[in-house]
Image: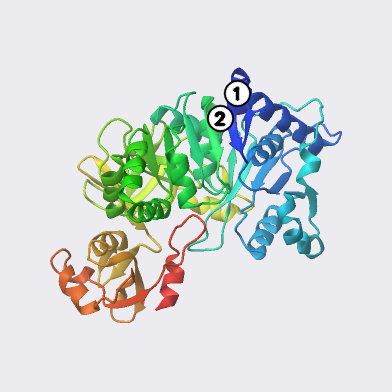
């Protein structure tokens, strides 16, 4: 067993998971995951890091399969239930997964891949049936999981984490956010991504707490669970908070009061996976009394920075490095930058991933000679806290000799009356290099000239968009992160 699984033997009688209206104890989770391991081994002594993919909705069964793969010595490759077939085929071919454990709901969907790439589909029912065998000893330095980058700027890469990496990612957050065994959390996040797997599910299980699954987001259902009185923590992406606010605003005053009263009792609410618009933070605080804790992380590092659990949470900032995480800001010449100066975030620590799967050159390019991981994200240190300015490749616009943060412009634009959301990008331009351009989501017709005139009160002229388009929504991936390259195509 891994350290995570071994640790939970002391919580055997406690409820670990609530899934599909049923409760499962830690003992049942351990027994089922060991049965999965035995069924995967089929008489072998060890899977020896074989890649085992699985397409299972967020659930008790998902967790048992993931733990079973680890207990058998395999590498877990969770697939996204919302991805189209070509995306899943890419992951299976890239990892050379030997089998795919598949929930009945997705068997027909995946069947074409049996002929196309020769992958073997194994029904979920077959791997969770009762079985026992002697399980291998798991060295914590072994590869444990491959998660794929979001692919918003390039082809997705398989991020390999070891059991040591995963444990470091978990324990850092458990300590920083003061997880306890009596905590109870709702998991509404996709489980092919570090946010749902590590921050919610694994932190909960490490602590002996309870994690309840809601596989498909529904604002009314989420609000009902938030009002149930059983939750102590809640974590979500900004788009979910936006939708929950919209539901609250459309409710009666009586219902609004009940929702606000219930959420005011939570000990912690966290936002991540995408930049949290300040107006969303302020509105959520207004209706719940909760100041969302923002943090910064990546598939490659888990979480690197976090606002304080007990001290100041400054809107628009992501706080300070988490315990065990080293950080520095570097300019384009690889020199450290001073306070209030933008620089690329580079990170060291035990939570940093091992490699990109079968991509030696990409792995080497991702690290400096001194072992710092180059995140590609730009930040600056202002008054003692870090502020993310954006991703160098998509959120930093290079125009007329200036380096402009698209996130800064977006933050101001969202304050214009009638703007529901926006995305700012740089479009190639022969004279300027790139020109600032804004895609705006609004319920009513807005005038671009009026917006530009208003922006002059808040931004220097070189940061004001030259181009505007108005759309009903922004292109997003399954985590709600805006795909800036798709936004550029809209122009």
Q: Examine the rendering and report whether any part of residue 226 can be seen.
A: yes
Identify the residue shown where x is 46% and y is 70%.
Answer: 486
Snapshot quadrant of residue 142: top right
Q: Mark 2 packing: few (<14 Cα in 10 Å), some, or many (20+)?
A: many
Q: Is residue 316 left or right of residue 376?
A: left
Circles 1 and 2: CB distance less than 8 Å? yes
Quadrant for the N terminus in the image: top right
Quadrant for the C terminus in the image: bottom left
Q: Mark 1 packing: few (<14 Cα in 10 Å), some, or many (20+)?
A: some
Q: Is residue 308 left or right of residue 32?
A: left
Image height of 177 relative to 161, above or below: above
- Residue 31 position, x and y percent, is 72, 27
Display coloring: rainbow
Q: Nearer the viewer, residue 230 or 136?
A: 230
Seen from this angle, which residue lies furthest bottom? 430
- Residue 93 position, x and y percent, is 71, 58
**Marks 1 and 2, the one that precedes in the sequence:** 1
Identify the residue shown where x is 68% and y is 40%.
Answer: 61
Q: Is residue 1 left or right of residue 217?
A: right
Can you identify the residue that label 1 sits on?
Answer: 8
Identify the residue shown where x is 41% and y is 47%.
Answer: 272
Give the Cα separation between the discs numbered 1 and 2. 7 Å
Q: Which mark is residue 205?
A: 2
Seen from this angle, which residue lies furthest left? 457
Local secondary structure at mark 1: helix
């Amino acid at each position: 067993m891994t350290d995570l699984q071994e640790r939970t033997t002391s919580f055997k009688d406690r409820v670990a998971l609530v899934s599909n209206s049923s409760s499962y104890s830690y003992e049942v989770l351990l027994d089922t995951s060991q049965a999965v391991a035995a069924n995967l081994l089929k008489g072998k002594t060890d899977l020896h890091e074989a890649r085992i993919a699985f397409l299972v909705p967020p659930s008790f069964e998902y967790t048992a399969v993931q733990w079973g793969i680890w207990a058998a010595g395999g590498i877990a490759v969770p697939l996204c239930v919302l991805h189209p077939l070509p995306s899943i085929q890419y992951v299976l071919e890239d990892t050379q997964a030997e089998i795919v454990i598949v929930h009945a709901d997705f068997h027909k969907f995946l069947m074409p891949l049996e002929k196309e790439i020769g992958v073997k589909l194994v029904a979920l029912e077959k791997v969770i049936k009762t079985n026992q065998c002697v399980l291998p000893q798991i060295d914590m330095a072994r590869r444990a999981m491959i998660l794929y980058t979001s692919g918003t700027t390039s082809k997705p890469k398989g991020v390999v984490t070891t059991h040591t990496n995963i444990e470091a990612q978990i324990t850092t957050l458990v300590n920083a956010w003061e997880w306890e065994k009596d905590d109870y959390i709702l998991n509404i996040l996709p489980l092919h991504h570090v946010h749902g797997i590590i921050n919610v599910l694994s932190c909960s299980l490490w602590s002996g707490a309870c994690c309840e699954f809601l596989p498909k987001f529904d604002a009314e259902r989420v609000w009902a669970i938030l009002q149930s009185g059983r939750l102590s923590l809640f974590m979500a992406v900004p788009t979910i908070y936006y939708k929950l606010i919209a539901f609250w605003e459309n409710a009666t005053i009586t219902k609004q009061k009940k929702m606000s009263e219930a959420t005011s009792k939570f000990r912690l609410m966290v936002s991540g996976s995408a930049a949290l618009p300040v107006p969303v933070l302020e509105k959520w605080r207004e209706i719940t009394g909760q100041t969302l804790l923002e943090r910064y992380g990546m598939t490659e590092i888990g979480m690197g920075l976090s606002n304080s659990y007990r001290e100041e949470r400054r809107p628009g900032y992501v706080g300070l490095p988490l315990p065990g995480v080293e950080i520095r800001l570097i300019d384009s010449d690889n020199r450290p930058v001073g306070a209030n100066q933008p620089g690329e975030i580079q990170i060291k620590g035990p939570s940093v991933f091992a490699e990109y799967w079968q991509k030696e050159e990409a792995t080497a390019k991702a690290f400096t000679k001194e072992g710092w991981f180059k995140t590609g994200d730009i930040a600056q240190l202002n008054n003692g806290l870090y502020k993310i300015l954006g991703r160098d490749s998509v959120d930093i616009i290079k125009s007329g000799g200036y380096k402009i943060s698209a996130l800064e412009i977006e933050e101001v634009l969202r304050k214009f009356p009638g703007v529901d959301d926006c995305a700012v990008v740089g479009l190639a331009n022969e004279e300027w290099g790139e020109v600032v351009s804004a895609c705006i989501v609004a319920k009513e017709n807005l005038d671009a000239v009026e917006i530009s005139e208003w922006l002059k009160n808040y931004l220097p002229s070189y940061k004001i968009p030259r181009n505007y388009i108005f759309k009903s929504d922004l292109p997003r991936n399954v985590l709600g992160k805006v795909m800036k390259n798709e936004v550029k195509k809209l122009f």
